């Protein structure tokens, strides 16, 4: 019985009610459990509690500051998103640039291989003519890679597919069949 009345008192105080709205426990009950001084302090604290007035300038200022904080947080989030977007674009650009540089370097090395083939293979006779043709093909392939880079190669392949769609589809199906057969085994 004593704890029920004390809990009722505490519950009512949490709802910002005044001290006269609280049902006080009986003094004899409080003396039994030694809570009389605690209840007296609670009543005094409730009588000095001030409930904020919604028409008060302080309340209006507090809500304005909260709105400004929310707007500021939203603006900071927008800036963070745009900064991460710019970083992603820069990273993609860097990857593309590195791929182009790597392709140009590979093309340069292939061109050098063609030059060494041309110097080391025979120059006369049927075998010399064939070896020189192979060396020239290797050198021209290396020059193409060096000049066009990866982005130029992608554009050239797309153009070739647009000009010849049916052979492109048949070649793709053949490559897919060959890869699937190798992976299946």
Image (cartoon, helix red, strand yellow):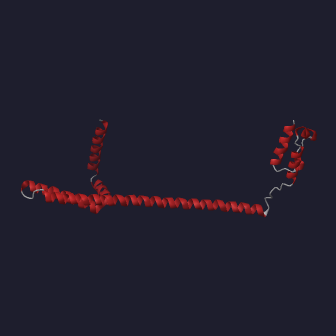
Q: Which residue is at a point 83% across and 48% down the rendered structure image? A: 13
Q: Residue 115: which quarter of the image?
A: bottom left
* Rendered location of residue 73, percent (x, y): 62, 59
The count of marks equals 0
Q: Which residue is at a point 68% across and 60% down the rendered structure image? A: 67
- Can residue 183 be seen here? The reply is yes
Give the residue furthest to the right.
28
Q: Is residue 144 left or right of residue 133?
A: right
* Rendered location of residue 185, percent (x, y): 29, 35
State the residue in front, 183 or 38: 38
State the residue in front, 103 or 40: 40
Name the image quarter holding the N terminus.
top right
Give the residue furthest to the front.
34
Q: Is residue 47 left or right of residue 148?
A: right
- Can residue 155 be seen here? The reply is no
Q: Is residue 56 left or right of residue 34?
A: left
Q: Which residue is at a point 80% across and 48% down the rendered structure image? A: 14
Q: Which residue is at a point 42% across and 58% down the rendered structure image? A: 92
Q: Is residue 30 left or right of residue 96?
A: right
* Rendered location of residue 62, percent (x, y): 73, 61
* Rendered location of residue 132, percent (x, y): 13, 58
Give the residue furthest to the left.
125
Q: Residue 78: which quarter of the image?
A: bottom right
């Amino acid at each position: 019985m004593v704890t029920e009345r004390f809990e009722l008192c505490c519950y009512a105080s949490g709802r910002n009610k005044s001290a006269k709205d609280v049902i006080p426990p009986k003094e004899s009950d409080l003396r039994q459990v030694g809570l009389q001084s605690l209840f007296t302090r609670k009543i005094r604290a409730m009588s000095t509690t001030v409930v904020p007035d919604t028409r008060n300038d302080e309340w209006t200022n507090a809500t304005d500051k909260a709105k400004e904080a929310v707007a500021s947080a939203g603006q900071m989030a927008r800036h963070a998103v745009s900064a991460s977007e710019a970083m992603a674009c820069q990273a993609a650009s860097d990857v593309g640039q590195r791929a182009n540089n790597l392709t140009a370097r590979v093309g340069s090395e292939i061109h050098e291989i063609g030059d060494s083939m041309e110097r080391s293979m025979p120059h006369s006779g049927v075998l010399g003519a064939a070896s020189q043709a192979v060396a020239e093909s290797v050198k021209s392939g290396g020059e193409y890679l060096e000049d066009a880079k990866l982005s130029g190669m992608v554009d050239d392949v797309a153009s070739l597919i647009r000009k010849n769609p049916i052979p492109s589809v048949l070649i793709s199906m053949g490559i897919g069949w060959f890869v699937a057969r190798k992976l299946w085994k």
